[in-house]
Amino acid sequence: MSQGLLIALAAALLLAASGWTYNRLVFNRQRVAAAWSGIDVQLKRRADLIPNLVSCVQGYMLHERTTLQALTAERGQAVALAQAALSQRAPAESQLASSLGQVLALAEGYPQLQADRLFIDLQVNLRDCEEHLQMARRYYNGAVRELNVLVESVPSNLLARLFGFVSGEYFAVNDHAERQAPNTEF
């Protein structure tokens, strides 16, 4: 083989490998975006259930009005941060989950509320929502991991830097108490 043909073949292989790596970076960036969308849907679903929960328990839990007001305020903050960066949104969502757990724990002291069909349905829906949210977070963090490996490892990091790909941010909860899903057992 002539030297010119070897150089052309090497250039073609380098171009093909670069194209393949670039496409993997794009694929993984899109997978992270789609995974975040799954989390966003579940967070919206949970936020939509909270007003129903508050109105259902208000009549029973007259002495816990401040707890219910705090839950309502935290829901408002979480909804307001719906378009914010993950670093701003995650703490608000974690606090909302914690307050939701407190309300559900307080509800255990009200036998009439525990027997209310609407409350039971809301508990089931919230438990289902929390399970879906947990799965969506795991999928999202896996997608972020795959993207981050490509953005940080050689030689894909060269293309990532060249084309402006950045590492994704994990959806993590820092407070151990907030890591627990709200208790929705009845």
Image: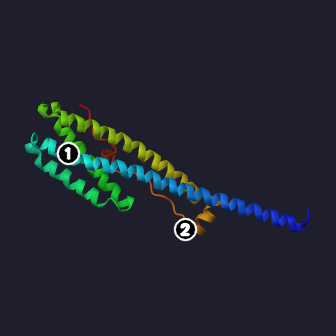
Q: The residue tagged with tag 2: helix, strand or loop?
A: loop
In the structure shown, which secondary structural element does the residue marked by tag 1 occupy? helix
Residue 139 circle label: none
Q: Which colour scheme is used?
A: rainbow
Badge 2: residue crowd in 10 Å (few <14, some 14–19, many ≥20): few
Determine crowd level at label 1: few under 14, some 14-19, many 20+ residues with C-alpha closer than 10 A: few
Q: Which amino acid does label 2 sit on?
A: Gly
Circle 2/circle 1 CB separation < 8 Å: no
- Say if 20 sits above or below 186 in the image: below
Residue 4 is left or right of residue 145, and the answer is: right
Instruction: Look at the image and tell me whether residue 125 can be seen.
Output: yes
Residue at the spot of label 2 = 164
* Among the two numbered marks 2 and 1 on one chain, the one whose residue lies closer to the N terminus: 1
Residue 97: x and y, percent?
A: 28, 47
**Where is the C terminus found, in terms of image quarters?**
top left
Q: Which of marks 2 and 1 is in front?
A: 1
Cα–Cα span, label 2 and label 1: 44 Å
Residue at image position (42%, 42%) is 135
**Residue 145 placement (x, y as % from top left):** 52, 51
Q: Quadrant of the N terminus?
A: bottom right
State left or right for residue 32 relative to residue 22: left
**How many numbered marks are there?**
2
Give the vertical position of 57 relative to 1 (above or below): above
Q: Which residue is drawn at 14% across and 35% down?
A: 113
Mark sitting on residue 52: 1
Q: Is residue 173 visible?
A: no
Please state if 103 lies on the left or on the right of 167 as rendered. left
Tell me residue 59's x, y (percent). Answer: 9, 42
x%, y% of residue 95? Answer: 27, 51
Residue type marked 1 = Asn
Residue for point 61% across, 58% down: 23
